[in-house]
Amino acid sequence: MEGLPTRLQKFIEDLGLRALDIIREANRIASEEGVESISRKHFHQLRHGRVSATAERIYIVVAAIRSVTGMLVNATDLFVLQPAVPQAGVFPWERSWPRPEPVSVSFHRRTSGGLWSTVRSVTDPTHPTNASEFEALYTEYGVLLRSIAIRRYNIPPDDAEALVHDIFTAYLQRREHVRELKGWLIGAIGNASKDYLRRRKREEPLLPEHDEKPDPAAEQKAERWMVNFTVATVIARLGEKCRETLRRYYFHEESKESIARELATSPAYVLQLLVSCRRRVRELYDAMRSSK
Amino acid sequence: MNVHYGDDELSVYALAPSLSADAEAIERHLAECDECSGRLQFISALDDAFREPETWEAVDLLLTRPQRIEAAMAEYLLIEKEDAEAEALLAPLLKSPIRFRGANVDSDVRFHTAAVVRKLCLAAHSSHEKQPQFSLLITNAACRIALGLPKSNKERRSVLALAVRERANAFRYLGRFAEGLKSLEDAEKLFDHSPATDAFDVAVVWYIRAIIYFETERPTEGLNLARSAAVVFHDYGDRSRELSAVMAEACCIHFSGLPREAADAFERVAAMAREANDSHMLARALQNAGTSYLAAQDHSKAGQRILEAVSIFDQLGLTTERARSTWKLASVLVAEGHLDDGIAQLFEAQSELRKLGLTNDAALATLEWAEARLAADLPEDVADACRAILVEFESEGMLRNAHVALAYLHEALRSGAATANVVRQVRTYIQDLPSRPSMPFVPVA
């Protein structure tokens, strides 16, 4: 009896992909990479969850689907992988009065435009556990922190880069004490930027937007930027084909016909591509939101 | 049944209504369906974000390799390596205080690294509750190693600050509050070289100091510190520490003799915990609110809050906290004047606390039971029950003081001079002993 559809099966169905196209592409990649190819039968079994996928199989299936769809799918989009080991750290409380280390929580808020600003609470809720996770954190949050320093505090880009680097160094030295990683990084760049301005412009007062008093207009602007940044982090995870099609259609306002000519395809295909890429954006965005 | 449009159909409609096969039907449906309108609004908001230049600027930045990534990765790998080495060196030693003491880590150069100091701080942090003497031993070693690091070591100052702050925490758990405050003063001075992180690190110092203040009957001094710490934790998005700091603030208010205001503050903590979906903190805030309401003689609200806390502790499987809340419910009954029921429940509570190994809580509940029995003019069994009372304290001095107070009670019970008031004096004294470890027991006539 068939159980629930696997992630792979659901993905193939949702995007209306042909299994044969994926198998051909997988075998082309396998041949280029010098790894074992995948038979139709084995792919069928994987698709229906009848066999477990080895790391090698996962690699070529993911690569094939990326190539076929132009989307930057992750292995976890297609397969259920071993969950990460949960972080230790819940501290026993023996009395109700406060103790220094209670359990950690996160929160989120909704923006007026219908999108969630997920940056403070969603995109990376855990500490990196290996070099590639740290690299991803440094890259993604580095952009966010540099942008805050540059846009909100008018720090020159090179100095903003240095401040961000120092913050990541400080983080590495005390990561055991940091519970809400994103909030901590954002709080740290705020303090580092203010200190920078005080040191560099000691004779000049801080600008109103650096003041601690809430400024609704600045808050709104910052919130909108956060939303756009969150969407940007999703777009950056798409495959190049999707990303560039979205860029050309929305940002450069090119017509479907023009994009189709460039891609040597039909406007109907471009429309289909736009619909599937936007669906992928929504899925990634929702996944980020629900991972809180 | 209301049939909704799928995201893809709405997506095409958002792209251009003319592309939809049934644009008019969709339009009519949207006018009546909030769910589909909401989803269309979300799709349109994403489309709007796709049109924003700053979205694409951010995309390009995200796709560009950061300038200093090589240096950052080198730093990460170095710290990981040092941490792994420190872990391997320390893991066998941290299994017991005897092994740790025997290893004499601060005179062995292999242990003279910033990573070892960080690991020792972490180990101490998780030992404070159960082995405070061991955690002091660990933090003392951490401080000595940090001090011995070469001055050129860029981490020297920050790990020394962390070690001194952790030692303050160890002192606090041991009830050595004066030494704890001194260490916090030293730690605060050491956190003055990294503008990005100092505010946060210093807020942790303030928080610990606020706890010491309210535990040493200086709650008014702790109040502002807890409040300031909460603001900083909020700025750093650290919701759990913020909640703890607001809880500390409420405790300071309670211990300032303002139970009504404290109950309001605990209600605020409960509201925040509800919003944050933090059941542990919610249950504790409710339990504390109940205690404050009890002190403010608002028995009805006290009962409601504690009952809710009991139910959450039940769901969380926190049997010890549940037992404490049940004990508080019995106290509410006694305070309301339902002596018979209250006495029966206090008896059950002390028995449950004893079974759970909460010796001191069981002792206090037994004393509360004895007090209620004497108030109800039911002295039978009180002397026997009080003779069976056991107390446990880390410090010999505290244990001796507690035994003196209990001996006074036994004598009063033997001579027939014991009253509810005498039992209350002994109970209050033992209850406050951790906050005032060196204060001798002096009975008030």
Image (cartoon, rainbow, N blue to C red):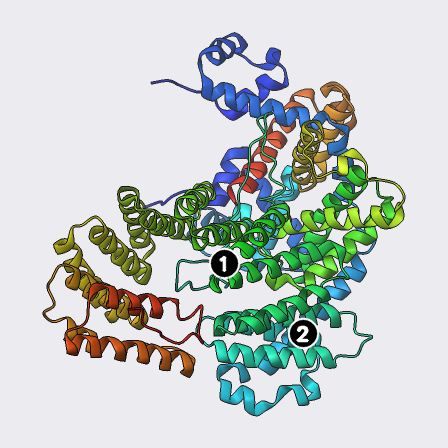
Q: Secondary structure at mark 1?
A: loop
Q: Position of residue B218 (x, y in %)?
A: 51, 60
Residue B415 location (% of width, % of height): 16, 78
Q: Is residue A261 above or below residue A10?
A: above
- Which image quadrant is residue B142 in? bottom right
Residue at position x 37%, y 48% in the image: B289
For image coordinates 20% across by 51% down, the residue present is B333
- Classify 10 Å Cα crowding around label 2: few (below 14), some (14-19), many (20 and above): many
Q: Is residue B360 visible?
A: yes
Q: Position of residue A65 (x, y in %)?
A: 61, 43
Q: Which mark is residue B391?
A: none
Mark 2 falls on what kind of element? helix
Q: Position of residue B418 (x, y in %)?
A: 19, 70
In the displayed structure, does residue A93 sit left or right of residue B134? left
Q: Chain of mark 1?
A: A
Q: Decide: is B40 above or below B265.
A: above
Q: Nearer the viewer, mark 2 or mark 1?
A: 2
In the picture, the quarter occupied by the C terminus of chain B is: bottom left
Residue named by callout 2 = B115
Residue at the extreme bottom: B102
Q: Nearer the viewer, residue B97 or B221?
A: B221
Crowding at mark 1 (Cα within 10 Å: few <14, some 14-19, many 20+): few
Q: Is residue A278 above or below residue B384?
A: above
Residue under label 1, please give it: A82
Give the residue type that dot 2 points to.
Ala
